[in-house]
Each structure stands twice: as C-alpha cells, then as structure tokens.
C-alpha cells in the first residue's frame, strides 16, 4: 500500500478531549458555512460521520462531489482514491482535501497504471476480440485515465452490473461494443457480478500482473468473457464460508447478506449480496424482529444495529472487520484541515494531473451516467 507523506499533528491536536474536538470542529464548520462541504463514506467511524454533510458509498459520493458547485472546499472523509475522484469530478475552482494522506487503499495499490496499460497491450496480442476495461472506483486516477483512453468506464459495487452490460452491449445499442471485459482491480466483485449476470465460472479467467501475459494463453483468453485482475479487499476477503455456517447454526432464521467483494464461495452461501447502499436499503426494509448477519466493514454494520434497535444485526464473523486505512481519518485530522481552511491555508489538497484528470473524467462520467442496481442480488433459491 502507498503511504503518502502526512505531517505529524502536534499540539493542540494531540491533547484535545473528545468534547473539545467536537466543539472546535462544529465551530469551524459554522465559520466556513457553505464554503465547505464534508463528505463521509459509510465505513467511517461515527465520531467522523457526525460532521459529514453527506454520507454514502463511492458512487453516491462521486455524484455528490460533482454536484457541490457552490462549495469552495470539499473535505473528503474517505480514502485517497475517493478524494482523487472528487477532484476529477469537481470544478477547477474547487479544492478537495483529504484530512489524512495516510488514508490509502490496499486494493487500489494492487494495480498500478503501467501494469494496467501493459495488460491491455498483452491481452490484445492474444485475441482479436474487443476488450473493454472496466475499472472499479477503488483505483488510482491514473488507472481511471487509462480506462477512459481505452474506451472503458469506471464502476462501483452499486452499478457494476450496469457497467458490465454496457461494456458488452453493441455500439448501435448505446454500449461499448466489447466482446470481453478486463475488470480491474477486484477479482471477487467481477466474478460475483459475472455469475449474477448468468455467466459461469468458466467464463472468467484471472489475469496475474506478476506473470507474462498475466499467466494466460490464447485458448484461455478466447474462452473467457471476463478477464479478472488478481486483486482483492482484505476486509471482505476475511469472510469465509464457515462464518455463514456458524451464523445459521446460531440463528436458523437469520438472513445473511454480504458485499460482492467477498469471495465467491461466501457470496453463494449468503442469501444476498449488495453494495453498502443496497445493504442499508435491504436492512431498512426488514421487519421488526428480523435477524441479519452482514459481511462488510464493521463501522457500517454497527451503525445499522444502532439505527434499527428492533432488529438483531451483527457482523458476519466474530472478529471485527475494520478498514485500517479508513480509520486514518479521525477528529484531530479533520479539525486540522478545517483550521487551515479558516486561516486560508488549504491543507492536504488532492490534485490529479491535468491530462489524467481529463481522461479519468471520461471514465467516471460514464460510471455516474449508468444506473445503479437498487436492490441486493439474491444468491440462494
């Protein structure tokens, strides 16, 4: 994972109490008014989320970033690739700030721009079929730019199916005219989505960037519709089939819902899979007294449990499933950034190279234009 240089916060930030931090952040927000908009991802802790003007998943926050035309500053309480996307989609006169530059993404670091460009070239040597790159939003702006230049699109877990369908639809029907999809960088999301679309596991082949031609030959590429970059989210990969079995053994009437970044065997054992927004919607529509075991980041699950106290809601595994990169954003760093804005000092501004910004915007705007799937995807009969 890429660790960016972040100043160590000294006094007064190190010694402020929770109440002092809350009071100062609230006061800074009041002073800045509409000049600042704070976006908070669902995986953030409550102590940060409480200050967000908007919360959501990557797709929702990407759309919101593009809509904040009145705000001079967008403070993104998420991770680095999210702040990059916000910079790409926001106006030239707006500044996007990430409270802590150490908030990266391990999955995004499993692919780099040079390797993705090489993959497109290598795979083109193995087939005459049109390959459309579809890049998960959990990636660098440089990779999004390569995707845009190659005629592809970004996606999130909320609309990945819509983007895959667009990629494989004929150009005369408004699609990309692709015959194959190169899905970067999460293999689990791509595999689970392909199966949900009616394809088989045999229609998927894994591209390993550490191997020549990804470890694939002509026959394997010819047989596959989906070429999956070898990458994963360590939080969601921590969920295992035995966790589903244990949850059902303890609570036979429990509903198991997991994020599509989970391994395929876990998704197949669950009742449904869905993005964070889809999970929130499904649990919210549940009946009082219903039971839920959820395979995604613990902060979101625990927040749902507090919101719906008339339901039994727990993380699928017994151990917490925490994104340590998202946890780099905390109250002291949020206050530090807001202090700077009040003083006229734009701290931790995230700026994408102009050329990459232009081409990444193409891929992101395609993502934003394609409809999200509203509901979770059932995985059991």
Image: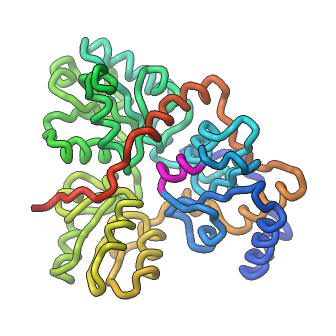
Q: Position of residue 363 (x, y in %)?
A: 48, 31
Q: Is residue 63 magenta?
A: yes
Provide the residue span drawn in magenta.
Answer: 57-64
Horizontally, residue 319 falls left or right of residue 198, namely right
Q: Quadrant of the C terminus?
A: bottom left
Q: Is residue 176 magenta?
A: no
Is residue 31 placed above or below 284 in the rendered structure? above
The image quarter containing residue 179 is top left
The image quarter containing residue 319 is bottom left
Which residue is located at x 76 percent, y 80 percent? 17
Q: Position of residue 109 (x, y in %)?
A: 50, 41
Which colouring convention does the figure follow?
rainbow
Q: Position of residue 62 (x, y in %)?
A: 54, 47
Which residue is located at x 20 percent, y 65 percent? 271
Residue 223 visible, this orientation: yes
Horizontally, residue 340 falls left or right of residue 138, namely right
In the foreground, 207 or 143: 143
Q: Main secondary structure of the magenta part?
A: helix
In the foreground, 199 or 7: 199
The image quarter containing residue 127 is top left
Horizontally, residue 341 falls left or right of residue 195, namely right
Q: Position of residue 348 (x, y in %)?
A: 74, 48
Which residue is located at x 45 percent, y 80 percent? 307
Residue 215 visible, this orientation: no
């Amino acid at each position: 994972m890429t660790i960016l240089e972040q100043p160590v916060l000294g006094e007064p930030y190190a010694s402020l109490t929770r109440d002092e931090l809350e009071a100062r952040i609230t006061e800074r927000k009041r002073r800045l008014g509409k000049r600042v908009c704070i976006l908070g991802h669902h995986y953030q802790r409550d102590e940060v989320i409480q200050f967000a003007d908007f919360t959501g998943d990557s797709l929702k926050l990407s759309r919101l970033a593009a809509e904040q035309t009145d705000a001079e500053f967008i403070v993104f309480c998420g991770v680095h690739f999210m702040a990059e996307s916000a910079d790409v989609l926001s106006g030239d006169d707006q500044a996007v700030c990430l409270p802590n530059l150490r908030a990266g993404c391990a999955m995004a670091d499993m692919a780099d721009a040079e390797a993705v460009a090489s993959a497109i070239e290598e795979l083109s040597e193995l087939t005459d079929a049109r390959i459309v790159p579809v890049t998960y939003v959990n990636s660098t702006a440089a990779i999004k730019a390569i995707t845009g230049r190659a005629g592809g699109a970004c996606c999130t877990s909320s609309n990945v199916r819509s983007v895959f369908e667009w990629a494989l639809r004929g150009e005369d029907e408004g699609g990309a005219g692709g015959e194959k999809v190169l899905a970067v960088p999460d293999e689990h999301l791509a595999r689970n989505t392909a199966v949900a679309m009616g394809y088989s596991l045999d229609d998927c082949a894994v591209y390993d960037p550490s191997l020549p031609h990804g470890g694939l030959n002509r026959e394997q590429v010819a047989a596959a519709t989906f070429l999956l970059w070898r990458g994963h989210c360590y939080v969601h990969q921590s969920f295992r089939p035995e966790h589903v079995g244990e949850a059902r053994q303890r609570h036979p009437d429990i509903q198991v819902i997991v994020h599509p970044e989970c391994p395929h065997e876990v998704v197949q054992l669950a009742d449904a899979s869905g993005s964070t927004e889809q999970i929130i919607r499904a649990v919210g529509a549940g009946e009082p007294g219903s039971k839920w075991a959820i395979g995604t980041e613990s902060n979101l699950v625990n927040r749902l449990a507090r919101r719906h106290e008339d339901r039994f809601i727990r993380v699928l595994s017994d151990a917490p499933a925490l994104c340590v990169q998202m946890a780099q954003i905390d109250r002291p760093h949020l206050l530090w950034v807001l202090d700077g804005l009040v003083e006229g000092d734009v701290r931790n501004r995230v700026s994408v190279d102009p050329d990459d910004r232009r081409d990444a915007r193409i891929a992101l705007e395609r993502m934003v234009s394609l409809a999200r799937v509203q509901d979770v995807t059932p995985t059991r009969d």
